[in-house]
Amino acid sequence: MTRYSPLSLAFLAAVIAALILLPLGMDPNGYLLRIMCLMLLFGGLGQAWNLVGGLANQISLGHAAYFGIGAYSSTILFNQFDISPLIGAVVGMALAAVFALILSLPTLRLRGHYFALATLAAGEVARVIANSWTSLTGGPVGISVSYRPDQSWWMLQFQTVLPNYYLFLATFLIISLVFWLVKNSAFGYRLRAIKENETAAEVIGVNTYRVKLMASLLSAVFTAVLGTLYAQFQFFFDPDTIFGLAAFSVKMALIAILGGVGTVFGPWVGALVIIPLEEMANSYLGNSLAGLSQFAYGVLLIIVILINPHGLIPLMQSMKAKVLGRRAS
Amino acid sequence: MTEPLLQLKNVTRRFGGLVANSGISFDVRKGEIIGLIGPNGAGKTTLFNILVGIYPPTEGEVIFDGRRINGLKPHKIAKAGLTKTFQNVALFAESSVLDNVVTGGLLHLKLSEARDFAMTTLDRVGIGHIAHKKAGDLSFPERARVEVARALCTSPKLLLLDEVMAALTPAEMEEIIDLVRGLRDDGMTFIVVEHHMKAVMKLCERLIVLNFGQLIADATPEEVTRNERVLEAYLGSNFSAEREVH
């Protein structure tokens, strides 16, 4: 079990306090607050992905499927039946769990690249379905969340972005807490055993299939709830974005991997680096040449990963150890 | 006479055209320490892998503790009380020694109980002092002991030890022999694959000899050393195998 020093706990408390208090001094509909919302959204997605990708090393490239299911479930129920997105979120979580269960039957016995490819295909299947089932989803033109003048928590529609921000923050912190609890439980030990040697894990009594399935379900459910929150934040999305490989599936994996795969704070750092980086690339280079911002963003990512393939959290830990070691000697 | 703990009935395993194990039958009684020997490629590790369920036998039956186990998944067989160590060492390399062993304990225990049991087990195996080292950083003999401790922590009735004494010094071998004997006195049963013949002769009361996937002898160490077929298997056509006998 990881033990944290009083100093790092105090630092964590300060970070959380800052996340709670900082937005109060900002423009409640401003650009900066929107970027912070996206950081928390993607931090949460990275953390949900980390439950299965980080702890069990099941590299999923199809998590956008769960995200999109969450977004479409709440939006369709709201637009067509006037059902609160809070209930829609629960329906989305249940549907994502069903999708994860069905997907797990053939894929959980696959390892490494084969698992990644199978999940990637599953994400694409979800995208194609959403594009073609026009009567339900509205098809390729996308779907808007109906606007309600009587904005309220029950409808998850607000005058400003501030309540959205706190929803993202709360969800992000809950997923992080669950991740930490899982990592330090018997369940976490079993996941790590699978990650490091699946055959040996089986032989000493780990039901590898069941453990991976539980992790996948948990991860899918959290990803779906973030889908609903995203829909209520953007008010519009289309199949190619929400089920998109680059926009979500790869990005949530990347955030966890860049920050430090399998660590609690990896997705925190990953989102803190990637989202502003992407925004800066878009705003400085977006107008000059089509695609240049994506190119610059890609180059920066490659550089970061080449410098440190284990992620930023392990890099910081080893730097800290070096500094403390030098001081001690 | 009581029911045997383990019964193999005509166990055969083919990989394509290769017959790794052919019609193997024998019984193991509770409290025995059995040596499974034979030249390289005789099918010893394959037989271990069949017993713990890594792959099912192509033909034949395995009865453990009164229950047919062939075809069950390894975690079910482990739960029934049968597990093994890995010859080429399959530790959770990025985890600490303690965490490796705790994972074994989780088969029957809660996390807090598993931690205590793992610590006791590490001490008993003589590696309590490296509990917090990373498993991947250990020397080969240390890793073999972690393998033993992790398997012991699942509280098996029958433990298959696959070459845990390779690369040990004579003094270290004595420690392992004492450990296995002590555990046997507590009621555990063992099948041991080992190339070091002196250690095998000292530890085991009964030897089963495989050659080209077939059982060629099942007798006391004394009898086995005088068995014509065994001598031929080891010395006959391939003289270089002689080194393994001594």
Image (cartoon, rainbow, N blue to C red):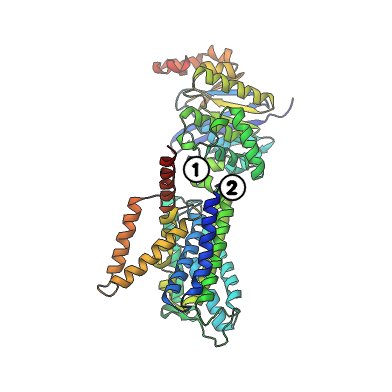
A290 is higher (above) or lower (below) than A222: below
Which dot, 2 or 1, sits closer to the camera? 1
Residue A9 appears in which quarter of the rendering? bottom right
Name the subunit of mark 2: A
Of the residues shown, which amino acid type is indicated by label 2?
Answer: Asn
Local crowd size for mark 1, using a 10 Å CA cut-off: few (<14), some (14–19), many (≥20): some
Residue at x 59%, y 81% (from the top left corner): A152
Residue A329 position within the rendered picture, expressed as x and y whole percent measured from the top left? 42, 37
Marks 2 and 1 sit apart, C-alpha to C-alpha, by 13 Å
Residue A191 visible from this viewpoint: yes
Front-most of residues A125 and A233: A233
Front-most of residues A51 and A305: A305
Name the subunit of mark 1: A
Residue A232 position within the rendered picture, expressed as x and y whole percent measured from the top left? 51, 77
Front-most of residues A15 and A63: A15
| Horizontal side of residue B65 vs A12, given as left or right | right
Residue A207 numbered mark, or none: 2
Q: Are marks 2 and 1 on the same chain?
A: yes
Of the residues shown, which amino acid type is indicated by label 1?
Answer: Asn
Residue at x 49%, y 77% (from the top left corner): A161
Task: Describe the element under mark 1 as helix, strand or loop.
Answer: loop
Local crowd size for mark 2, using a 10 Å CA cut-off: few (<14), some (14–19), many (≥20): many
Residue A197 numbered mark, or none: 1
Residue A61 visible from this viewpoint: no
Residue B197 position within the rendered picture, expressed as x and y whole percent measured from the top left? 51, 17
Residue at x 48%, y 67% (from the top left corner): A41
Front-most of residues B108 and A188: A188
